[in-house]
Amino acid sequence: MADTATATAGVDHHDDHGHHESFWSKYCFSTDHKIIGFQYLFTGMAMGLIGGFFSYVFRMHLAFPGSSIPFFGVVSPAAYNSLVTNHGTIMIFWVAMPVLIAALGNFLIPLMIGCDDMVFPKINRLSYQIFLISAIVLIASFFVPQGGFGGAWTAYPPLSAESQYNGTPFGAPMWLIAVTLEIVAFLLGGINFVTTVMNARAKGMKLYDIPMVVWMIVIASILFMASVGPLVAGAVMLLFDQTLGTGFFDPAAGGDPVLWQHLFWFFGHPEVYVVLLPAMGVVIEIICTFSRKKLFGYRMILYSSIGLGILSFFVWAHHQFISGVDPRATYLFTTTTLLISIPVAIMLFAMIGTLWGGSIRFTTPMLFALSFIAEFLIGGVTGIWLGSSGTDIYLHDTYFVLAHFHYTFVPIAIIGTFAAIYYWFPKMFGRQLNEFWGKIHFWGTVIPFNGIFLPLFVLGAAGQHRRIAGFTAYPDLYTENFQDLRVFATGSLIVLILFQIPFFINFIVSLKRGKKAGPNPWKANTLEWVAPSPPPHGNFGDNLPEVYRGPYEFSVEGREDDYWPQNLPEASK
Amino acid sequence: MLEYFLPRASSFAGSIDHLFDLITYLVMFWFLLVMAFFFYVVFRFRAKPGQKAQYITGETHKQKQAVEIPHYLILICDLAILFYTFKVWHEVKIDMPEYDEQVRVIAQQWAWTFEHAGADGVLDTEDDIVLINELVLKKDTQYKYELQALDVMHSFSIPVFRLKQDAVPGRKIYGHFKPILEGEWDVQCAEMCGYGHGFMPARVQIKSSDEYAAWIAENTPANLKQDAAYANTESKLKEAPNNG
Amino acid sequence: MGHKIIATGRSRTGIPTGRLAVWWVVASEIVIFGGLIAVYLLNRFLHGSWAQSAAHTNTFIGGANTFWLLTSSYFVVLAHAAAEKRDAKTARKYLWLTIALGGCFMGFKSYEYATEIAHGYTLFTSNFWSFYYMATGLHGFHVLCGMVIMAIIAEKDIKHEQNWHRVENIGIYWHFVDIVWIFLFPLLYIAK
């Protein structure tokens, strides 16, 4: 295979910028995959702060109903609905997706497969720009008259379709346009990721030599592409309903509101795995490196994740057990839902198997990765109560559901992201984060996280429903014991938010003053550690690496070093 | 476990609670086992000076079996859950027992309308008792409910009954319940339905048959009262053949 | 900068990167239109009124449009063949013929919309018509995009005898747009 640029690359005329690039062309309009990765990362983190602020406001409101919340004021029912809706939307579409898929995918894929950039750098830049516009549209939707959309992130029509019901004639269409733009951005990005990994791998890198996190991002991108289509079709229809007044989802006009639920959840359930898989990949990289162990069952994990992806297309209606679909359909969907626990469990077991016989070093990224396994396990097993249609009759749309999916999404989007940042920070910026403050941040994140959501399981089991702006109207729920639990959860959230301050200080200080990291501070095997830290434009200079072995050859018997980088030729044993 | 928080006020609440307990025991067993193993592994294989990690691929037959065998066991547990789930689901959502009383539940932004069939046990007759945000039921009586939504999706949820059903505009959805406990509890809306979603509380009152009869008598207009008792038996006779 | 991206030129699968990407674009578009068609079929089976409304679509114009698109697909194949032979003049000629047929399609489409609206079948008449306008509109938008991209390729690339592979890539996309029409045509026009 010719590594030199063939005719296909002859159209990139970006040499004409000259040597001195302005701030704008270097950091805002760059086509360099690393810069685009950072753009996604920082946009995602900024949106995460917004989403986190929202959660602070509505948790405070639930703990102290009716009182004025510091930095916000009194929460009206309309504001409450808008806050929970946009908290959900932001955390999934503007935090988990951009950070776990787009930021990590952009930063890691070219480095890990040993090439100098994505195959379509300009499409990559376009993808980020569309994403940025979508974020701006969403934020703008909070400030239009009547405020932001408040019909839950699932946007069930007719509530979402007609402004006479939802009361947000501008907020609702803007919300929908923002989500659609975001989807377009990730379709472009996903095509780029998949094509890059298929075509631009380093010489010698066979399919089973690809690092697991790259595999996971690719599988997630394909999953996203395959599942999002019906939602795009549905979003166009809903947008027509909202703005032009057609009646696709309006029962009075012969439409069917349940149809939207099918289109939404056909995407919505695979979406969980779209963000789960990259986080799993991150965790796999980290536990292999810090237990100095070869990955336990590379192919088993790979096939499980593919099986998981396929199975995830047949479980969507477990979100709709009681929504008026044919009750007989639940037999099928309960079965598939309980089955889907198997591939996830295999992956978690294989991670624990990787730890077995290892030599585990408790660095900050490793602590985050280990806590991912433990916390995600809670999220996984609580899914059984909900996947069983019998108990779902009672638990559907209660705080039990809420606690369940926060036990999956927080490990994915918060713990997984922090693990990735602590692990790849030396590669991203050439310096290491402070370990001491990292560990404080770790314990200050994981302990309050359990403090928030364990009480919510109890409240959910007691029959407290989601998205309810105030429990004062419900005598059975507004008891002293339950209110204590709510205050406890809110207090834990504030502790968690406060413990993010050391992280941001650590991040900023370490950018300038952190310990200098060599190219390979963790003594890891994958190709990104071959490039200098931080990698220059073009990553590896003129000598692109070649690959001689799999990515997890740690502690090979007969070798002095306990790691064996992928790019070292056999002779250098 | 759920009865610790809320009494079981319907005939099928017990079934759902038992399913909940079954899942809890099975899941907790596996969860604690895996957690214990996980912490054991993390503790046992912590880095010690001079000790190198082992080289295990996880690709040999024996190693694969170490992962596979627990999963066969998990699968068996899944099947047990599945079997019991089907039974409960059938009891609550598919089976439609013969009913003695009817009630119509209409959800709208942001209130519940409950149409009680009244003295004659038939809906849409003159003696119907229509109440807003107040559902009155007779203990130990099999009910059939009809659920409608006037504007957007709502969800009819009575936690003490362990019952929940979405109300879809443009559809009539039927279901059943049988109250078995006297008392008064919350009815909630469980589907986001706009600004007032959090503020459409209703109460369900379950009365003994004497109290219920008194309540009927009190709420039935005087001109319809005389033959109320007769009409009630009459309607039962008429309805019975159609129930099969 | 000044660095030439090597990644774009690599081809581990043996399929040129551009073509591979177009296939992925097509794959994700298939799911979008698949969703639309699934929605149509669902409604069609649930509501008898959809079949009655479908009787009012203009089968002649639909058929003519099918003809334009199929012929244009043939021309785009000829353009590709010419591009393979590095024959810029012929390739450009066939590309422009394809665009012209796409233009015929759009013209007929506009006429069809105009007559239907004149007969009172607007976006708001019924859900069938809402769907009809949305689905054909979305498809028409794809046709229009294909025409614009093809014009750019003809004038910016082929005229200057560079990026020959783009003819094939736009060809794949154009075939896909045709195939979507092959599905929409019987569903919306023929099945009554």
Image (tube, coloured by chain):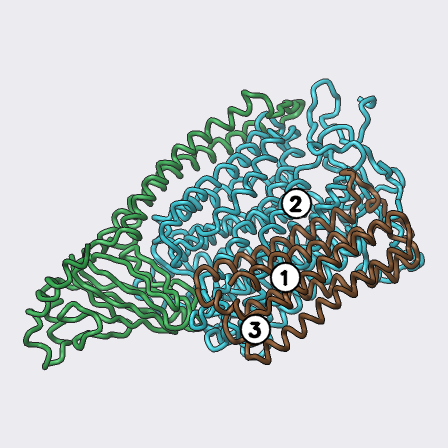
Chain colours: A cyan, B green, C brown
Of residue B102 and residue B192, the one placed in the foreground of this image is B102
Residue where numbered disc 2 is placed: A217
- The secondary element bearing badge 2 is classed as helix
Separation (CA) of disc 2 from disc 3: 32 Å
The crowd level at tag 1 (other Cα within 10 Å; few <14, some 14-19, many 20+) is many
Horizontal and vertical percent position of residue B128: 19, 74
Seen in the picture, residue A254 relative to A98 is either above or below; the reply is below
Of residue A151 and residue A7, the one placed in the foreground of this image is A7
Dot 2 falls on which chain?
A
* Earlier residue among tags 2 and 3: 3
The crowd level at tag 2 (other Cα within 10 Å; few <14, some 14-19, many 20+) is many
Horizontal and vertical percent position of residue A415: 59, 47
* Earlier residue among tags 1 and 2: 1
- The secondary element bearing badge 3 is classed as helix
Separation (CA) of disc 1 from disc 2: 21 Å
Residue at the farthest front position:
C60
Q: Is A328 left, or right, of A94 in this rendering?
A: left
Q: Is A343 left, or right, of B138 in this rendering?
A: right
Horizontal and vertical percent position of residue A375: 51, 44
